[in-house]
Image (tube, rainbow, N blue to C red):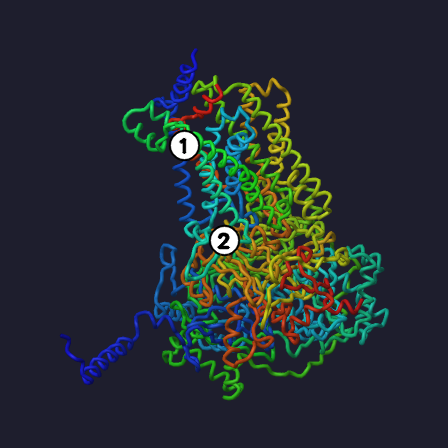
C-alpha cells in the first residue's frame, strides 16, 4: 500500500467509529443516562430532606461521597500521565491511548467535581467556598485543605480540558473533511480554521509541548492536595506524611486500570486492533505493575509507622483497619491492589488482553475500596472511645455512586460518537 | 410650578402624619394576648430580650427542690435550681430540668374527659365534669358505697385541703401510694425509736457514710440534697463513703468503696458490723443487754460466706466505722425492699444509735413529710374493696397503681367496679386509661401551691403563666367540688385559700417573704429519741446467722435515675438523654454481669425472655461491668405489672424476683447504646496512675501568631471527684441551647445531638469514672483550621465559635475534632407545638446541614457582658455561669475568666489535680478536669 492510501485508511478507520449508532450503543447510553438522572433525583431528595438520608453519622462525617471524589480524581490522573508525561518522554505507545485517556480525565473530573457539592450539608451555599469579594469582608480560610482542593481540582480541570481540546484541533480538521452539512460546520468551527500549514504545525507543536510540560507537575500536585485533605487532619490513619506520594501512586494506578477497562472493549468494538496492539497493552501493564508495587509499599509503610510510633491511637487504628468492622474491605483491597497485580510479572499474562481487562476491573474495585477503608475506618475509631461508631452507606449514597458512573459513561459514550477516538495525526506521524 | 409650602401647612401635615402613626400603633394586635400572658404582671414589666425569674418548686418527684423559672416574653423557657433553697440549694436534677417539657408536652390532656358508652374518652366541660363528680359522690352515699381519695405523696396546704375536702364531702382519704414508700425504714424507726418516720439525714456533717442499698443519687427521698451534701462533705476532706448493694446503681458507682452483697443478706452484714462495734466498744453508746444478747453471733468467716463480702473488706468497714468520729448509716432502696428489709433497716438504726448519730446526723425533728404514704398492703386492701363493689367514687390523683402494682392485685380489673373512678393527672398513663372520668391537672408552673417536703421547710409553688389548656390545679378542683356540694358556689379559689393559710402561719410579712424568696425555713430543735429495748430485742429473735438465701438468678428491679418509679416516662427528653451507667437512651434493657453473659453466650442487644410464673417480659441484654453474678437488673420503670410479692411485716413491695427464667428469644433488639466502648482503653481520658508520669510537649511551633486575649478568656473546670454522672447538666444544656430531641431512629444511627454528654469508663474491676465531655474550646483548635469558610473561628475571648449561617456543612471540623463533640444537623428538627414555646429566643434553632456544638452558653456571657458594660466594669467572677454548671447538684463545674487571678477557674486550674483530655495532641483545651478519683478532693491530703 502506498503511503497516502495508508494515511487515508487511518482516517477512515478512526472516523468510522463515528458512524450511526447501533442498538447496543443506544441501550448502553440509555442506561448510563438513566443512572445519571437517578443521581440528580436523589441529590434533590437529599437537599430537600437533609444529609440524614445518607448513612453518615457521628463520628463518620465522610463516607461514600468523599470516597467517590477521591476515586474519580484518581481515575482522572492517568489521562494526564499518559498524555503529557509519556509525551515528554517520547513514549510511542502513548499514541494508542492518549485520546481516550484524556477524555477519561475530563469526564472523571466532572464526576469527581460533583461530590464535594453533593456532600455539603448546605449545597446551596457552595459559593462560600470561593474567595469572591463581598461587602461583608468574608473570606475563605486558606489554612483549610478544602480550599486548596477547590483550586487544585479546578486548575486541573481547566488544564485538562485545554490540553484535550488542543490535541483535538488537527483531528477536527480531518473530521471536517469527511462530514457533510451541520456536522461539517461544527467541526469546522471547532478546528479553529486549521489548514495544516507549516507555521500552524510549528505553533501547534510548541503549544502542545508547553501544555504537556505544564500539565505534568499537576499529576503530582493535584493528588497531593487531595491527599492533604486527610493528611492535614489529626485523625490517626489520616495524619501521615507519606500520604502525598502514596495517593499520587494510587491515582496513577487506578487511572491506568481505568484506561485498560475502557480501551479493551473500545478496541474490540471499534476494530482498532491495528492501532492498539498487544505491545501497547504490555507497556501499560508494566505501569500498572509498577504503581501497584508502590501502593503496596505504602500499605506496608503505614502499618510499620503505626507500629513503630508506639502511639496507642495509631496502633489501634491500624489494628482495627485490618481486623475490625471493616476488615473484609481491607482484605479485598489487599487482594485487588497488592496480590492480583503481581501476576503481571508473567509476560504471557501482560499480553493477555482478557486477563488485563479482568485485572483492571479488580484494581478499580480495589482502589475504590482503598479510599473507603482509609476514610471510614480511620474516622470510625479515632481518639475518644465513647464516640466510636460504625457507618454503612444508605441506599441514597449507593444510588448517587452508581449515578456518577452513569455520568462518566454517558459522557464517554457520547465522546465515542462525536470525537475522533484516537489521535489520527499522531498515528500518521508514526506510520 | 410647585406651590410653596407654608409653615402652617407643614405643621398641619406633620401633625396629621404623626397622629395617624401613633393611632395605628395603639390597640392590641391579634394574638398579643397570648404572647405575653401573666397571671401576675411582674413589677418590672416585660422587657423584650431580657429574662425575668420567678421562684417555684419542682413537682416532678416528691423531693420538693426549689426552682427559679426563667421567663422570656412571659413564657417559661427553663428551670434552674434555686440557690439557697433549703432542699436543693441551686442544684436541679435531670428530671427537674426536664419537667418543663411536661408543661409544654404536646400530649397534655387539654380538657376534662369522660368515658362514653363505647369506652372512648370524650371532652366535656368543667361544669359538667364537676357536677358529675358531685352527683356521683351523693349517689354513692345513697347506695351505701364509700367514696375514696387516693393520691401520690402530698404535703403542705394541699394535704390539708384534701383533708377538709374529704371531711366536707364525706370521702375517705386512703393512705398515699408511692412505689418507694420506705416502709421498712419507717417501720424499723417506729419499733426502735417510736418514730415511724423517714428522718432527715445530715450527710454533710458526717465523716463516714455507709449507705446500704439507698440510692441517694437517684431516687432515694431527696437526691439533689444528698448529692450536694456528699459533695460538701468530700470538699472538707477526710470523708469516706462506703456503699453496699446487691446490684449496681449510680450511687454505688460513686461511692468511694462499693461493696457487693449477696441479695437479701444485708442484715447479716450490718449485724456483723454492729457486733464488732459493740465488741470493740467503739460506739458512743451501748445497747441494752437484752438487745445485745438477742443479736446472732457469727464469725468473720461465716459472715463473709453468707454475705459474699470478703472477710478483709468486712474488717476494713468495721475499722473505718469504729474510727470515724461522725459515722452515718443510711439503709434503703432495694436493700430494704426484700423479705429481710425490716431487719436491714433495724440493724442500720441500731448502728446509728450505737454510733451516736442521732440526733446530729439522723434528725427526726426535720423528718420527711411522708407519714401518709401507705404500702402495698394498703393497695391490696383497696383492690379487695373495689372488688367487693363497695366503692363509690374513687379519686386517683397523681398516681399510677395500674402500672406499678403486680398484676395479681387485679387493680386494673377491679378499678371498673367502682361507681366512678376519677383520675387526676396531666399525661395519659395506664391508670388514667382505665378511669371513668379524667380531670386534667395544671402543671406546677401554672398553679399556686406549696410543698413541705420535710418538717421545717415550706416551698412555694407559684404560677409562671396562665394554664395553656383548660386545666385546673388540684386545689382549685377540690375547692370547686366542695363548693358544688355546699351550694355556696366557688367564690374563693385555691390562691385565696393558700394566701389565707400562709398569712395564718407566717403573718403578712412572712407571706410576702415567701412569695419573694420562694421558701420558708424554720429551724427546729434537735429531737432526742430513745431506744425501745424490748421491741429492739424482739426484732432479731430467731434470726439465724446466715439468713435465707435467695434463689438465683435474682431479678432486681432498680429505681431509675431518669424516670423515678416510671412517673417521668412520658417526657421525651428523658429518653433522649442516655442512662449514665449503660449509655442506653431509648428502650428497656436487662443488665447482665459479664460472667453470666460469657457463660450463657449473651451479647449486648441480644433479646431474652425473663419469666417468673405467669409473668414474662422481653428485654435486650446489656452487659454491665461491675454487676455481681447471679443478679440481673431491670429498671422498675420499664417493667409492667411485675409479679412482686409484698413484705409481710412492713407491707412494702419486694423489688426482687427470685429464680427467674432467662431464655434467649433468638432475636436482636435495636437499642441505642451510645457509648462505643465501655473502657477507655488506656487512653487516659480519665488518667489513672499509669498516665501520671506522661510528659507532654507543651511548646507549640506555629506558623500563625498566637491568639491574644485582652479582657476575658473563658474557661471551665470540672471536678471529676465531684461529678457523679447524674446527667442533670445534660438536660440543662438541651433546654438552654435549643438542642433538638431527635428520637430513637437517629440514636441508632449515632446521630444524637447532645452538646454535652456523660462518658462512663469502666475499669477492670467494674469501677466506673464519669467524664462529662463537651466542646473543649481549644486554644489550638483542630476544627478551626480545617473549616474552609471560617464558620469555626476563634473569638477574642478564647471561645471556639461556630457561625451557623456561614457553615456550609463539610463536616470536616467534626471529623477533625478529637473529642467528637460537634453535632451535625442531619435533618430539619422541629419542635411539636407547644414545645416550640420552650425555645430559648437568645439563640437560634439551627437548620439542616449546619454543624453545631457547645458555645459555653455564649448567650449568657453576652448578657453578663451587657450588664457589666452598663456599669462600666468587667464581668465579675460568678456573675456568669453556664447552664450545665448552674444545674450541677454537686457543684462539680466551675466557669469563669481565666485571665482573672481571683476567679474560681484560675484557682482550680492551677490545682495539683488538674489535667486536660488528650493534652498530648497539643489542642490546648479551655476545659480543665480535676482528677482525684473516688474519694473526693480531700483524698489526696488523706493518703
Residue corresponding to mark 2:
B743
Is residue B579 among the parts visible in the rendering? yes
Disc number for residue A410:
1
Task: Give the quadrant of the N terminus of chain A.
Answer: top left
Q: Nearer the viewer, residue B148 or B152?
A: B152
Residue A352, percent across and down?
56, 18
Q: Nearer the viewer, residue B769 or B361?
A: B769
Few, some or many C-alpha atoms within 10 Å of disc 1 (few <14, some 14-19, many ≥20)? Answer: many
Q: Chain of mark 2?
A: B
Residue B582, percent across and down?
62, 53
Is residue B221 among the parts visible in the rendering? no
**Can you say whether B752 is above or below A289 in the image?**
below
Marks 1, 2: nearer the viewer: 1
* Real-space CA distance between mark 1 and mark 2, rounded to the nearest whole angstrom: 41 Å
Question: What residue is drawn where x is 49% and y is 60%?
Answer: B803
Q: Do pointers 1 and 2 mark residues of a single chain? A: no
**Can you say whether B200 is above or below A344 in the image?**
below
Residue A258, percent across and down?
51, 30
Find numbered disc 1 in the image and state the secondary structure of the residue it sits on: helix
Please indicate whether residue B826 sits to the left or right of residue B128 in the image. Answer: right
Residue B752, percent across and down?
53, 54
Tell which residue pokes out farthest to the top in this image.
A1
Amino acid at each position: 500500500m502506498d503511503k497516502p492510501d495508508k494515511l487515508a485508511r487511518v482516517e477512515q478507520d478512526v472516523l468510522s467509529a463515528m458512524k450511526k449508532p447501533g442498538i447496543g450503543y443506544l441501550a448502553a447510553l440509555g442506561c448510563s443516562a438513566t443512572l445519571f438522572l437517578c443521581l440528580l433525583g436523589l441529590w434533590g431528595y437529599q437537599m430537600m430532606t437533609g444529609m440524614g438520608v445518607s448513612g453518615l453519622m457521628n463520628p463518620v462525617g465522610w463516607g461514600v461521597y468523599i470516597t467517590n471524589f477521591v476515586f474519580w480524581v484518581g481515575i482522572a490522573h492517568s489521562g494526564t500521565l499518559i498524555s503529557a508525561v509519556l509525551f515528554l518522554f517520547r513514549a510511542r505507545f502513548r499514541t494508542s491511548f492518549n485520546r481516550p485517556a484524556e477524555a477519561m480525565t475530563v469526564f472523571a473530573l466532572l464526576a469527581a467535581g460533583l461530590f464535594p457539592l453533593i456532600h455539603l450539608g448546605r449545597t446551596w451555599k457552595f459559593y462560600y467556598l470561593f474567595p469572591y469579594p463581598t461587602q461583608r469582608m468574608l473570606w475563605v480560610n486558606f489554612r483549610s485543605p478544602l480550599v486548596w482542593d477547590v483550586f487544585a481540582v479546578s486548575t486541573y480541570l481547566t488544564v485538562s480540558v485545554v490540553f484535550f481540546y488542543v490535541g483535538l484541533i488537527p483531528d477536527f480538521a480531518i473530521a471536517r473533511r469527511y462530514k457533510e452539512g451541520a456536522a461539517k460546520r461544527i467541526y469546522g468551527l471547532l478546528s479553529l480554521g486549521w489548514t495544516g500549514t507549516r507555521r500552524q504545525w510549528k505553533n501547534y507543536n510548541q503549544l502542545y509541548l508547553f501544555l504537556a510540560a505544564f500539565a505534568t507537575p499537576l499529576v503530582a500536585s493535584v493528588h497531593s492536595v487531595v491527599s492533604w485533605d486527610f493528611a492535614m487532619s489529626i485523625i490517626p490513619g489520616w495524619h501521615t506524611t507519606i500520604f502525598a506520594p502514596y495517593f499520587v501512586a494510587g491515582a496513577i494506578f487506578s487511572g491506568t486500570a481505568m484506561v485498560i477497562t475502557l480501551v479493551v472493549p473500545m478496541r474490540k468494538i471499534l476494530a482498532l486492533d491495528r492501532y492498539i496492539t498487544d505491545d501497547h497493552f504490555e507497556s501499560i501493564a508494566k505501569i500498572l505493575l509498577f504503581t501497584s508495587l508502590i501502593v503496596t509499599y505504602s500499605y506496608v509503610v503505614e502499618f510499620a509507622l503505626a507500629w513503630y510510633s508506639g502511639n496507642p491511637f495509631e496502633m489501634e487504628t491500624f489494628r482495627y483497619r485490618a481486623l475490625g468492622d471493616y476488615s473484609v474491605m481491607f482484605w479485598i483491597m489487599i487482594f485487588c491492589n497488592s496480590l492480583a497485580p503481581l501476576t503481571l510479572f508473567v509476560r504471557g499474562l501482560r499480553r493477555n488482553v482478557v486477563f488485563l481487562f479482568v485485572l483492571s476491573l479488580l484494581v478499580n474495585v480495589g482502589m475504590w475500596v482503598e479510599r473507603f477503608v482509609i476514610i471510614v475506618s480511620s474516622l470510625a475509631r479515632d481518639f475518644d472511645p465513647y464516640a466510636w461508631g460504625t457507618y454503612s452507606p444508605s441506599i441514597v449514597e449507593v444510588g448517587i455512586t452508581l449515578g456518577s458512573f452513569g455520568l462518566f459513561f454517558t459522557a464517554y459514550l457520547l465522546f465515542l460518537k462525536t470525537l475522533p477516538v484516537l489521535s489520527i495525526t499522531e498515528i500518521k506521524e508514526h506510520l | 410650578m410647585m406651590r410653596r409650602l407654608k409653615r402652617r401647612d407643614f405643621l398641619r401635615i406633620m401633625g396629621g402624619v404623626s397622629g395617624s402613626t401613633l393611632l395605628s400603633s395603639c390597640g392590641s394586635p391579634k394574638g398579643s394576648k397570648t404572647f405575653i400572658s401573666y397571671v401576675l404582671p411582674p413589677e418590672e414589666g416585660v422587657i423584650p430580650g431580657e429574662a425575668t425569674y420567678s421562684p417555684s418548686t419542682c413537682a416532678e418527684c416528691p423531693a420538693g427542690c426549689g426552682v427559679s423559672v426563667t421567663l422570656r416574653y412571659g413564657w417559661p423557657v427553663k428551670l434552674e435550681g434555686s440557690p439557697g433553697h433549703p432542699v436543693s440549694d441551686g442544684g436541679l436534677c435531670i428530671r427537674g430540668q426536664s419537667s418543663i417539657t411536661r408543661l409544654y408536652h404536646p400530649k397534655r390532656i387539654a380538657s376534662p374527659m369522660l368515658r362514653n358508652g363505647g369506652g372512648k374518652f370524650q371532652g366535656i366541660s368543667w361544669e359538667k365534669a364537676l357536677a358529675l363528680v358531685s352527683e356521683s359522690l351523693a349517689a354513692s352515699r345513697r347506695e351505701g358505697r364509700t367514696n375514696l381519695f387516693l393520691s401520690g405523696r402530698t404535703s403542705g396546704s394541699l394535704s390539708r385541703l384534701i383533708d377538709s375536702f374529704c371531711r366536707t364531702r364525706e370521702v375517705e382519704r386512703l393512705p398515699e401510694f408511692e412505689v418507694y414508700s420506705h416502709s421498712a425504714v419507717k417501720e424499723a424507726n417506729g419499733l426502735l425509736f417510736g418514730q415511724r418516720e423517714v428522718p432527715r439525714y445530715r450527710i454533710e456533717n458526717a465523716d463516714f457514710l455507709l449507705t446500704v442499698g439507698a440510692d441517694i443519687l437517684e431516687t432515694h427521698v431527696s437526691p439533689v440534697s444528698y448529692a450536694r451534701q456528699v459533695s460538701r462533705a468530700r470538699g472538707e476532706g477526710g470523708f469516706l463513703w462506703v456503699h453496699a448493694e446487691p446490684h449496681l446503681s449510680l450511687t454505688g458507682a460513686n461511692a468511694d468503696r462499693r461493696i457487693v452483697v449477696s441479695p437479701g443478706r444485708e442484715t447479716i452484714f450490718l449485724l456483723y458490723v454492729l457486733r464488732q462495734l459493740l465488741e470493740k466498744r467503739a460506739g458512743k453508746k451501748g445497747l441494752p443487754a437484752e438487745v445485745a444478747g438477742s443479736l446472732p453471733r457469727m464469725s468473720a468467716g461465716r459472715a463473709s460466706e453468707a454475705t459474699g463480702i470478703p472477710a478483709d473488706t468486712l474488717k476494713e468497714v468495721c475499722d473505718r466505722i469504729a474510727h470515724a468520729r461522725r459515722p452515718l448509716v443510711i439503709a434503703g432502696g432495694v436493700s430494704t425492699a426484700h423479705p429481710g428489709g425490716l431487719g436491714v433497716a433495724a440493724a442500720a438504726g441500731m448502728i446509728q444509735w450505737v454510733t451516736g448519730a442521732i440526733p446530729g446526723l439522723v434528725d427526726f425533728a426535720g423528718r420527711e413529710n411522708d407519714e401518709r404514704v401507705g404500702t402495698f398492703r394498703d393497695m391490696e386492701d383497696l383492690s379487695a374493696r373495689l372488688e367487693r363493689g363497695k366503692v363509690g367514687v374513687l379519686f386517683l390523683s397523681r398516681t399510677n397503681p395500674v402500672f406499678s402494682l403486680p398484676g395479681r392485685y387485679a387493680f386494673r380489673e377491679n378499678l371498673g367496679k367502682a361507681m366512678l373512678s376519677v383520675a387526676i393527672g396531666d399525661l395519659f398513663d395506664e391508670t388514667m386509661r382505665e378511669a371513668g372520668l379524667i380531670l386534667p391537672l395544671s402543671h406546677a408552673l401554672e398553679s399556686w401551691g406549696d410543698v413541705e417536703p420535710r418538717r421545717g421547710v415550706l416551698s412555694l409553688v407559684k404560677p409562671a403563666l396562665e394554664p395553656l389548656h383548660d386545666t385546673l390545679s388540684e386545689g382549685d378542683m377540690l375547692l370547686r367540688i366542695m363548693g358544688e356540694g355546699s351550694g355556696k358556689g366557688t367564690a374563693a379559689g385555691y390562691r385565696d385559700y393558700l394566701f389565707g393559710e400562709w398569712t395564718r402561719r407566717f403573718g403578712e410579712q412572712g407571706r410576702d417573704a415567701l412569695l419573694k424568696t420562694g421558701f420558708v425555713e424554720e429551724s427546729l430543735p434537735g429531737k432526742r429519741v430513745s431506744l425501745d429495748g424490748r421491741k429492739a430485742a424482739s426484732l432479731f429473735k430467731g434470726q439465724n446467722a446466715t439468713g435465707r438465701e435467695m434463689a438465683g438468678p435474682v431479678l432486681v428491679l432498680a429505681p431509675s435515675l431518669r424516670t423515678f418509679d416510671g412517673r417521668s416516662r412520658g417526657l421525651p427528653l428523658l429518653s433522649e438523654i442516655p442512662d449514665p451507667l449503660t449509655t442506653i437512651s431509648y428502650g428497656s434493657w436487662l443488665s447482665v454481669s459479664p460472667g453470666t453473659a460469657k457463660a450463657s453466650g449473651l451479647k449486648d442487644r441480644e433479646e431474652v425472655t425473663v419469666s417468673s410464673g405467669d409473668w414474662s417480659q422481653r428485654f435486650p441484654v446489656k452487659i454491665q461491668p461491675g454487676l455481681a453474678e447471679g443478679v440481673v437488673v431491670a429498671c422498675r420503670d420499664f417493667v409492667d405489672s411485675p409479679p412482686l410479692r409484698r413484705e409481710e411485716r412492713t407491707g412494702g413491695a419486694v423489688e426482687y424476683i427470685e429464680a427467674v427464667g432467662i431464655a434467649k428469644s433468638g432475636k436482636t433488639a435495636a437499642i441505642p447504646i451510645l457509648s462505643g466502648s465501655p473502657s477507655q482503653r488506656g487512653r487516659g481520658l480519665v488518667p489513672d496512675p499509669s498516665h501520671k508520669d506522661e510528659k507532654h510537649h507543651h511548646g507549640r511551633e506555629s506558623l500563625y501568631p498566637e491568639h491574644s486575649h485582652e479582657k476575658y478568656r473563658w474557661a471551665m473546670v470540672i471536678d471529676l471527684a465531684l461529678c457523679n454522672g447524674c446527667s442533670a447538666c445534660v438536660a440543662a444544656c438541651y433546654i438552654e441551647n435549643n438542642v433538638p430531641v431527635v428520637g430513637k431512629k437517629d440514636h441508632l444511627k449515632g446521630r444524637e445531638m447532645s452538646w454535652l454528654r456523660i462518658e462512663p469508663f469502666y475499669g477492670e474491676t467494674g469501677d466506673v469514672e464519669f467524664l462529662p465531655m463537651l466542646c473543649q474550646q481549644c486554644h489550638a483548635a483542630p476544627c478551626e483550621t480545617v473549616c474552609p469558610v471560617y464558620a469555626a473561628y476563634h473569638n477574642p475571648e478564647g471561645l471556639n465559635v461556630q457561625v451557623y449561617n456561614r457553615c456550609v456543612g463539610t463536616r470536616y471540623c467534626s471529623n477533625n475534632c478529637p473529642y467528637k463533640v460537634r453535632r451535625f444537623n442531619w435533618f430539619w428538627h422541629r419542635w411539636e407545638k407547644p414545645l416550640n414555646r420552650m425555645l430559648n429566643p437568645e439563640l437560634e434553632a439551627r437548620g439542616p446541614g449546619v454543624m453545631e456544638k457547645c458555645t459555653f452558653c455564649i448567650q449568657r456571657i453576652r448578657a453578663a457582658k451587657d450588664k457589666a458594660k452598663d456599669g462600666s466594669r468587667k464581668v465579675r467572677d460568678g456573675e456568669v455561669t453556664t447552664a450545665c454548671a448552674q444545674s450541677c447538684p454537686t457543684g462539680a463545674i466551675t466557669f469563669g475568666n481565666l485571665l482573672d487571678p481571683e476567679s474560681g477557674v484560675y484557682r482550680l486550674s492551677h490545682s495539683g489535680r488538674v489535667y486536660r483530655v488528650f493534652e498530648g495532641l497539643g489542642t490546648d483545651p479551655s476545659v480543665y478536669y480535676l482528677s482525684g478519683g473516688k474519694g473526693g478532693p480531700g483524698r489526696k491530703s488523706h493518703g
